[in-house]
Image (cartoon, rainbow, N blue to C red):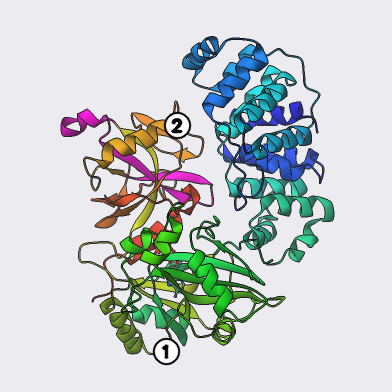
Amino acid sequence: MRFTKLVDYLAKLEATTKRLEMTAILGALFKEATADEIAPIIYLTQERLGPAFEPIDFGIGEALAAEALAKASGKDKEAIKKLYNQHGDYGIVAEKLLSDSGKAFTVTQVFDRLKEIALASGEGAMTQKTDLLADLLQKLSGREARYVLRIPLGRLRLGIGDPTVMEGLSWSVTGDKSLRPQIERAYNVCSDLGQVARVLKSEGVDALAKIQVEVGKPVRMALAERAKNAEDIVTRLGKCAIENKYDGFRCQVHKRGDEVRIFSRNLEETTAMFTDIADGIRQQIKAKTAILEGEALSYDPETGEFHPFQVTMQRKRKYDVAEMTVKFPLRLIAFDLLYLDGKDFTSQPYSKRHETLASIIAPGERVELSRHLITQDAKEIEKFFMEAITNGLEGIIAKRLDSRYQAGMRNFNWIKLKRSYQGHLSDTVDGVIVGYLRGRGMRARFGIGALLVAVYDDDQDKFATIAKIGTGLSDAEWPQMRELLDKIAVAQKPARVDALIEPDVWVEPKYVIEMQADEITRSPVHTAGKVGDEPGYALRFPRVVGFIRTDRKAEDATTVKEILRMFEKQGKSMSQ
Ligand code: ATP
């Protein structure tokens, strides 16, 4: 496919905010693409050069883009800057400056060039990147350059999340979304929509079932639902396993011989940060190949006791790793096994996975099995829960004994029961900031006074508002927040945001914050869970807990479905 053709599709996508139209446009695009080019097309529309878990940084910032544009167009940097100030988008500047010739490159050629630019490293890399980008821009038409430049700058803003891509893939085959379950299953297992699309295109729908768990490719993680109390757990699960709910970093560990890779809850690679866990796996896991999951917590080597999450948190850094591993060593509390010595364990029942996991952990400092009790007695569960709370843990997780590991699913195979505080919802809500209001009164000097926050509607691939929140950040944090938000400010309501409230500044849905609230109420001004003329749902007395959650992507925020379930459950929270 010629790149100019892809640009036609991107322009059409840009012109609509209606999800159904987007899906149909993507469907037509994917239908036209060949098996070789469909993966690059998907990565490019998502502003990437590969699956999210293998990030290749473009290394192209605004300054470099301006420089390359100057070179490609023969204009001086001042002229470029002026145009940029006028339009606020280097894509448009490129379109204005570059001629209308070009149009000969294919999608694959553009993709390969961008990859070459991204991979340029070492001494002189900046000059090399600038030259390569300038050369590429020169060979493109202005309209093509508009989109090519927006990709590395993260400015495509098409509003296409993974669910929309999956439905587009289904449309490309059947003209409707009926294949989404098969596509989603494959995606949950390999976390790479490019691979899923390639298999679908070259081998057909039935071949998707052949995509299986592989060591080295993160599996989208299984998540837990909520329960009101121990009785509720027993009613739902009957005889079940109860485990402690540890509050640390979720780690999915992939081991092949001595090679160990660790992925976080949102499938980012964290191996370099958690070298002590990787060492522990090499020493204590008796398997050639394995994928296992656990929670990594910092502990005091003197007493063996775990530190609170605030201490564990300090391990999330890219620098001074060696020093931190000595100061705050981590231990992995393993709780699940997904793969062992060539065998996929995800379809085995939980009880078998846990038992096998227990058998491959050798004694040692770094890895241990999660504490676990099998029972169907609500009283016993309550006792286990109280012990967990007394030990400073968050609560418990109950697990259905005969359940498979359902990648990427939040359901009642796992049920969490967390400590509740009087007058609080028994769980916090993770929301995505979609805009902010300028401050009044005391906050006027910050230019920011409240955040407009949304939750994720995963059926519609939209962010629906749930709260306007002005409490919980300190005077030092508000200006910091504003600086971060101004970098992702946009002129209009972003395509995927569903809101009735108009903030002073819209921002791309990117940053996730954790919120505590007293309860969930119905509200006519918020769109979370809103159907037709009925009111939506809102948080009452919301306050920010902590700052931005860097371990969450926008799509990892609490979902509308979870809010509806929390609404049903509130008021009947577990007593302590
Ligand atoms: P929360 O804010 O409650 O941690 P979450 O959205 O991060 O929620 P949930 O699915 O709600 O994730 O809760 C499961 C999380 O609890 C897992 O992601 C994992 O990190 C953590 N966890 C701690 N102990 C266990 C355990 N024994 N089994 C499974 N998960 C556990």
Please tell me the numbered disc located at residue 493.
2
Image quadrant in which the N terminus is located: top right
Please tell me the numbered disc located at residue 376.
1
Residue 502: image x %, image y %?
36, 32
Asked which quadrant contains residue 74, the reply is top right
Please tell me the numbered disc located at residue 2.
none
- Give neighbour class at mark 2: few <14, some 14-19, many 20+ (Cα, 10 Å): some
Asked which quadrant contains residue 569, the reply is bottom left
Cα–Cα span, label 2 and label 1? 50 Å
Looking at the image, do the residues carrying marks 2 and 1 touch, with CB atoms under 8 Å apart? no
**Identity, as a three-letter code, of the amino acid under mark 1:** Gln
Q: Is residue 397 visible?
A: yes
Residue appearing at x 46%, y 44% in the figure? 463
Magenta stretch: give its range: 438-467
Answer with left or right where residue 95 lies relative to residue 318: right
Nearer to us in this view, 153 or 416: 153
Q: Is residue 525 visible?
A: no
Q: Is residue 121 above or below residue 237?
A: above
Q: Earlier in the sequence, mark 2 or mark 1?
A: 1
Residue appearing at x 65%, y 61% in the figure? 217
